[in-house]
């Protein structure tokens, strides 16, 4: 990887900007008012991956670009993001985020001109990158790929615009073509699993008719999964949260990427205005949703009002997410089948909604096989009461564990060569 693929970043920059092209939107607030301002720069990084999040609170117009290294001036390759009409917090001006890990040197912020704040990411070497924005609160995300190549090129990704109902499940891993291309490597580390209990802290998630909170249920399920999966020693299991704390969605993905997880499982409980809605479903990331319910679900899980969520063109066609899509579909199907089977042994009449696709922010940019489980409806009185029963939560955890075990042995993992 010697050339900076500037075009990739430039083409993708701003696609998620809800109002269209970068700089097309009027600033949400002028710099003087201080309403819209760069209030924090957050970074997660290892030597092959970096995610930088720039918090502006209100929506701003922005543009990303790159500069090549200038050895004569001692300047490294740089990615810069210009933010129009935003103020800036003084501490951020004074304190660059220093990293120096072989991929990222530092992130610094300055006033480029009276109207523009410039965030500069100094790289240690030229790298592929992409930039997008997430609303509510507004933040600009920069994902930097220090490898420039897909670690494991599996089957071509499925067309993510195909509605979930018609999505074909990819062929099993034993198919001769895959076997020929991908001789099973000898693993040098246990399969790394990142379990992500959704919501937490100030974000309770969905709340049932008698007050049961999604954030508490999914944390309990996550702990059970970790406990069961860790017993054999074959898995290195981590959790994005192990207590009642709020963690932004982009940080959860970054934690999985930074930790080089092979498998990412985000845990949620569904909800609907229709109190009779019921059943288990497991999702993979797609640009859009095949029906209104799935779009509403994704908007709620993303913490974005549905009116702002519609029309957002979602980018998932980065190389990692695209390359992992078939694997994610396979794991999602395995998880959903196993969860329904395990819960069914304890309760009669368990419904399945099956494998589905929707634009969940928490799955965007995941470099590994990544799925999101919606383990029944907390808005349904019967399912809520079931979710209060530890034996039901055990059933859900047993299903996820069984699926991860199967997938760990049969799937194409993201970091099998490490
Ligand atoms: Zn949720």
Image: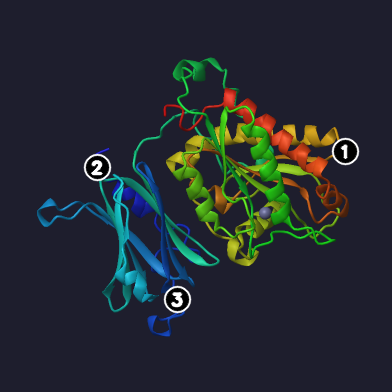
As helix, strand or loop, the secondary structure at mark 2 comes to loop
Looking at the image, is 218 positioned above or below residue 151?
below
Residue 343 pos. (x, y %)? 81, 37
Residue at figure coordinates x 53%, y 67% from the top left: 137
Mark closer to the observer (3, 1): 1
What residue is shown with label 3?
36
Left or right: residue 366 versus residue 409 is left
Task: Decide: few, some or many residues near mark 2? Use Cα within 10 Å; few <14, some 14-19, many ≥20.
Answer: few
Residue 219 pos. (x, y %)? 68, 50
Q: Are the residues flagged by discs 3 and 2 in contact, CB closer than 8 Å?
A: no
Total marks drawn? 3
Using the numbered discs, state the Cα–Cα distance from disc 3 to disc 1 in whole angstroms: 51 Å
Labels 1 and 2: the sequence-earlier one: 2
Residue reaching furthest to the left: 72
Using the numbered discs, state the Cα–Cα distance from disc 3 to disc 2 in whole angstroms: 35 Å
Residue 22 pos. (x, y %)? 39, 64
Residue 232 pos. (x, y %)? 62, 27
Looking at the image, is 65 positioned above or below residue 55?
above
What residue is shown with label 1?
347
Indicate the quadrant containing the C terminus: top left, top right, bottom left or bottom right: top left
Looking at the rendering, which quadrant does residue 14 occupy?
bottom left
Mark closer to the observer (1, 2): 1
The label on residue 143 is none
Q: Would the CB of label 1 be found within 8 Å of ligand 1?
A: no
Viewer-closest of 257 and 357: 257
Viewer-closest of 310 and 33: 33
Mark closer to the observer (3, 2): 3
**Residue 354 makes an appearance in the image:** yes
What residue is shown with label 2?
3
Viewer-closest of 313 and 126: 126
Task: Decide: few, some or many residues near mark 1? Use Cα within 10 Å; few <14, some 14-19, many ≥20.
Answer: some
Looking at the rendering, which quadrant does residue 149 occupy?
top left
């Amino acid at each position: 990887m010697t050339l900076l693929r500037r075009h990739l970043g430039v083409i993708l920059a701003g696609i998620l900007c809800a109002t269209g092209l970068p700089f097309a939107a009027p600033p949400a607030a002028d710099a003087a008012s201080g309403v819209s301002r760069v209030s924090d720069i957050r970074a997660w990084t290892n030597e092959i991956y970096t995610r930088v999040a720039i918090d502006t609170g209100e929506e701003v117009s922005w543009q990303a670009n790159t500069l090549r290294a200038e050895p004569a001036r001692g300047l490294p390759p740089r990615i810069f993001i210009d933010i129009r009409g935003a103020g800036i917090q003084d501490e951020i001006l004074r304190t660059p985020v220093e990293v120096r890990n072989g991929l990222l040197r530092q992130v610094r912020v300055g006033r480029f001109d009276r109207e523009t704040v410039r965030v500069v990411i100094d790289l240690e070497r030229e790298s592929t990158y992409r930039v997008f924005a997430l609303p509510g609160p507004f933040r600009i995300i920069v994902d930097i790929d220090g490898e420039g190549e897909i670690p494991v090129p599996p089957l071509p990704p499925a067309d993510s615009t195909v509605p979930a109902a018609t999505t074909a499940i990819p062929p099993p891993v034993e198919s001769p073509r895959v076997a020929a291309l991908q001789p099973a490597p000898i693993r040098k580390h246990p399969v790394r699993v990142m379990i992500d209990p959704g919501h937490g802290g100030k974000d309770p998630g969905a709340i049932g008719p008698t007050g049961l909170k999604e954030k508490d249920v999914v944390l309990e399920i996550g702990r059970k999964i970790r406990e069961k999966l860790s017993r054999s020693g074959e898995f290195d299991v981590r959790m994005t949260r192990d207590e009642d704390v709020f963690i932004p969605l982009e940080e959860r993905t970054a934690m999985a990427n930074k930790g080089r997880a092979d498998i990412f499982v985000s845990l949620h409980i569904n909800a609907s205005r229709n109190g009779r809605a019921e059943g288990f479903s497991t999702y993979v990331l797609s640009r859009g949703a095949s029906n209104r319910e799935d779009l509403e679900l994704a908007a709620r899980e993303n913490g974005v009002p549905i009116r702002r969520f519609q029309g957002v063109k979602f980018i998932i066609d980065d190389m990692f997410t695209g390359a992992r899509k078939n694997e994610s579909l396979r794991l999602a199907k395995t998880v959903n089948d196993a969860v329904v089977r395990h819960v069914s042994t304890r309760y009669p009449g368990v419904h399945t909604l099956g494998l589905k696709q929707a634009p969940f922010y928490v799955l965007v940019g995941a470099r590994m096989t990544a799925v999101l489980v919606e383990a029944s409806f907390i808005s349904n009185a019967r399912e809520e009461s079931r979710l209060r029963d530890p034996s039901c939560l055990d059933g859900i955890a047993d299903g996820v564990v069984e699926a991860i075990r199967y997938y760990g042995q049969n799937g194409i993992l993201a970091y099998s060569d490490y």
